[in-house]
Amino acid sequence: MKWERSDWAEVFASTGAAAIIGGYVRYSYQGELLPFSEGLMIAGGVLLLASITFGFGGIVKFFSRRSSQLGTNTAILSLAVIAILAIVNFVSYRHHKRFDLTSEKLYTLSDQTRKIVGGLSADVNIVRFAKVPPPTELTDLMSEYKNVSSHIKFQNVDPTEKPEIAREYGARHMGDVIVAFGPRKENLNLTPEGGLSEGDVTSTILKVTRDKVKMACFVTGHGEKSLSDSGAEGYASVDQGLKKEGYNTNSINLVTENGVPPTCDVVVIAGPTQGFFPQEALMVHKYLDAGGKVLVEEDPETDPKFDDMYQAWNIAVGNNIVVDASGVGRLIGTGPETPLVLEYGDSPITKNLQGGMTFFHLARTVSVADKSKNDSQGVELLKTSDRTFTIPKLEKEVKFDPKTAGPLSLGVAASRRSGEQSDRLVVLGDSDFAENQWIGLQRNGDLFFNAIDWLAQDESLISIRPKSSTNRRITLSEGQVAILRWIELILLPGLVIVLGISIWWKRR
């Protein structure tokens, strides 16, 4: 049998196409272009060129027919559409953009994460040790981090195939996720579902990249909020949040410690219900004058005996209770004793809170005492609306008092500099806003942690933190459930039957 040029062209075309497809399949499976796969695709391309050369006459003859020309036009249009789609897909891949339609922007990285990750100057390796590929949620989250910084590196490693990498990172269990920055390594805490949250990833990155872990010390002995209290009025959420921010926490007693320990970078006095001894108040004052950083949260109807310190810092704490007559408290199930703040002062603490809301359950005024001689550079942080006013004590019936009407200040941040030394003091007229039951409300948590970051001179951490989803479940009373069942079982079916009979009657 004598082979014609067209026969050779068909053999070269089919063999070349098979070689190209085989090489591409090997490349897709192996994840890298090995020499054999590359050779297959090159050989396939050469064979396709040979088939065109051998069958050129038949190709010209084929395309000279009218039916072939029409088919060619259709094929060209189809290829053009495919090419356009390929270009669009390529551009969208290179310039990735996602739209987060959730009200809390749950799938958009927070400002805090963008600040921390965007400021990386060296690679941070995040390694997941598992046989199975990572879930889609994890790969999507890691893609968001890599979009912020090219220094974020993520990989999934099978420890049975590469035990040397598992030993290098110290992985002990299947499913471990480890974050490494140079010699520093830290295990990532998984959610109960086995996933990762943005807050945990960012806080772990912060832990391994920080040169020093700062200490936030909470004063005890005067009825202050407790870091170990997980009840509604406790500060366990504050403790957890600070540790996520990369701080260590500790409870201190000024009497037994004979002052503020040198390990404390920030001192927090959260809602004391009893007065400090004069010696203790003097300890706090001297600590501030020596470059200390202090946050005082002073509730109404209490007196921690800090008058001398406040006077030295040009801060006035009112002996009153702020009442909000706007009715906004009903939005969160409270009354006028919980004022809302929408206006914030010009401070790094509140810079990112503009446009957000903070709530303060039972608060007193805290303001700059003499604005004409503001030597301590005090800034009034929180301003209530003009529908707020003050009363001496909480009573059953409260009437609007225009003489004490707002806007009212609920907090002051003050700083003094002497050479290289920087003294910083924040005084807030409420400690309840950071309790476990309130800290997750709107921007309450951001206010507290921003204040700590500013005091610790960690301004790079001041931002809006990762969000959590809002509980949108509706709780119905027994009467409402009965009404819904009556509508579902009687009213709606009855309406359908009546409409059906009406339509039948008109058409009969």
Image (cartoon, rainbow, N blue to C red):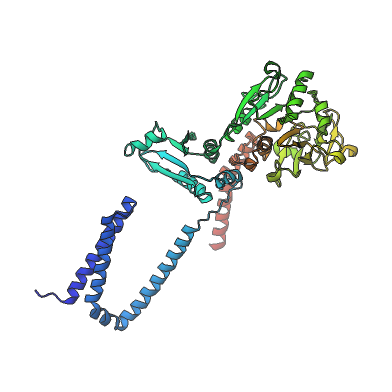
Q: Which percent across, then down, holds residue 44? A: 26, 64
Q: Which percent across, then down, holds residue 332? A: 70, 37
Quarter in which the N terminus is drawn: bottom left
Q: Which residue of the protein is positioned furthest toward the top in this rendering? A: 256
Q: Quadrant of residue 35?
A: bottom left
Q: Quadrant of residue 331?
A: top right
Looking at the picture, tell me which residue is in the foreground, 426 or 91.
426
Tell me how many marks there are: 0
Residue at 50% x, 56% y: name it.
Answer: 96
Q: Which percent across, then down, holds residue 343? A: 76, 44
Residue at 47% x, 58% y: name it.
Answer: 94
Residue at 26% x, 78% y: name it.
Answer: 59
Residue 125 left/right relative to 239: left
* Residue 22 in view here: yes
Q: Is residue 88 above or below residue 242?
A: below
Q: Quadrant of residue 7?
A: bottom left
Q: Is residue 343 above or below residue 4?
A: above
Q: Which residue of the protein is positioned furthest toward the front in this rendering? A: 419
Q: Which percent across, then down, holds residue 256? A: 68, 16
Looking at the picture, tell me which residue is in the foreground, 317 or 338.
317
Q: Which residue of the protein is positioned furthest toward the right in this rendering? A: 403
Looking at the picture, tell me which residue is in the foreground, 395 or 505.
395
Q: Which residue of the protein is positioned furthest toward the left in this rendering? A: 1
* Residue 159 in view here: no
Residue 138 left/right relative to 317: left
